Image (cartoon, rainbow, N blue to C red):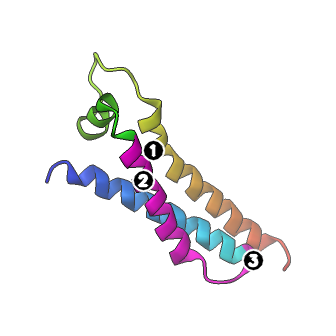
Amino acid sequence: MKSLWPIIGLAGMWIVAGAAVGLGINSLYGGSWVIPCGVLNMIVGLFLLLVITRNESARKIFYEGPSHEDERSLLVALLWALPVAAALAGVIWWLLGKVLPS
């Protein structure tokens, strides 16, 4: 059960970031994009987790955290940083949709 929380946290970050992107697309172009973008983003994030954790050192860093003798894993860092960047882009798109005339 202990190793389930990083996966839940990561999936939550990816779905919230996808919903933010969907909200930004809604603001710019209209339509209903929040749920499809959120779900698609979560699927992409969990697929990347699956690909990254096939590497034993990346799996250890993800589930147990880095130790002093481990190398830093750029892929694990990107797995956590990409949803933050996507959420920031979604917020910027949302603001642009509110500022720019339709």
Dot 3 lies on which element? Answer: helix
Dot 2 lies on which element? Answer: helix
Residue type (three-letter) at the residue carrying disc 2: Phe
Q: Which mark is residue 47?
A: 2
Residue named by callout 3 = 29
Relative to 39, residue 79 above or below: above
Q: Is residue 43 magenta?
A: yes
Which mark's residue is nearer the viewer, 3 or 2? Answer: 2
Q: CA distance from mark 3 to mark 1?
A: 28 Å
Q: Residue 18, how many percent across, how many down?
A: 53, 64
Residue named by callout 1 = 79
Query: Looking at the image, which residue is at 51% across and 53% down?
Result: 83
Q: Residue 94, how many percent across, how many down?
A: 68, 69
Q: Residue 72, how many percent across, how many down?
A: 40, 24
Mark sitting earlier along the chain (3/2): 3
Mark sitting earlier along the chain (1/2): 2
Which mark's residue is nearer the viewer, 1 or 2? Answer: 2
Q: CA distance from mark 3 to mark 2?
A: 28 Å
Q: Is residue 83 magenta?
A: no
Residue nearer the viewer, 101 or 81: 81
Mark sitting earlier along the chain (3/1): 3
Magenta segment boundaries in residue numbering: 28-51
Quarter of the view holding residue 13? bottom left
Query: Looking at the image, which residue is at 33% across and 55% down?
Result: 9
Q: Residue 26, how many percent across, how many down?
A: 67, 77
